[in-house]
Image (cartoon, grey):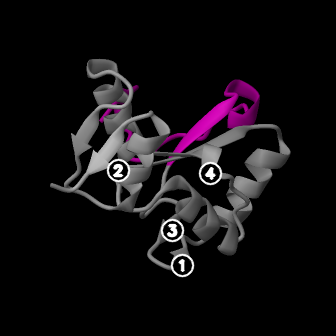
Amino acid sequence: MAESAGQVRSVPQGSAVALTEVYDTALLDLDGVVYAGPHAIEHAVESLERARTAGMRLAYVTNNASRPPRVVAQHLSELGVPAEPADVINSAQAAARLVSEKVPAGSRVLVIGGAGLVEALQERGLVPVRS
């Protein structure tokens, strides 16, 4: 905790300037930040709409590799948060990118994971195999 003039600060201070004026893009974790399972977190939909209306680009980041970005974007849209697959970045995409930098396009890659990982590898020109 930061101390100022002998006082301990235990809660974040507000910003004198709207974050949408300072930043172009917000990277938003999903589970527990934007939604919890099938439900939006209280105030998330309205807050994200205000940020979007003010011109901020919203990118949704998740370490859940089981669902492809199109499925996550659809879920967000159903909750009232308009999203496209390109707005979603998941850990499967990160893993596929790393693999694609190490092996040539068309390489067969053993997948031990869900549809999200299969799709991410295919998008990188790799051939997912199960055994």
Question: Could you tell me how far apart the alpha carbons at marks 4 and 2 are, in whole angstroms?
Answer: 15 Å
Looking at the rendered structure, the secondary structure element under dot 1 is strand
Question: Could you tell me how far apart the alpha carbons at marks 2 and 3 are, in whole angstroms?
Answer: 14 Å
Contact flag, marks 1 and 2 (Cβ < 8 Å): no
For the question of whether residue 18 can be seen, the reply is: no
Q: Which mark is residue 35?
A: 3
User: x, y percentage for residue 71?
Assistant: 54, 64
Type of amino acid under label 4: Pro
In the rendered image, the residue lying farthest to the left is: 131
Type of amino acid under label 2: Asn
Q: Is residue 65 above or below residue 31?
A: above
Crowd band around label 3 with a 10 angstrom C-alpha radius: few (<14), some (14–19), many (20+): some
Question: Could you tell me how far apart the alpha carbons at marks 1 and 3 are, in whole angstroms?
Answer: 6 Å
Question: Could you tell me how far apart the alpha carbons at marks 1 and 4 are, in whole angstroms?
Answer: 19 Å
Q: Which mark is residue 39?
A: 1
Q: Left of 127 or right of it: where is 73?
A: right
Residue at 35% in and 51% down: 117
Which residue in the protein does label 4 denote? 85
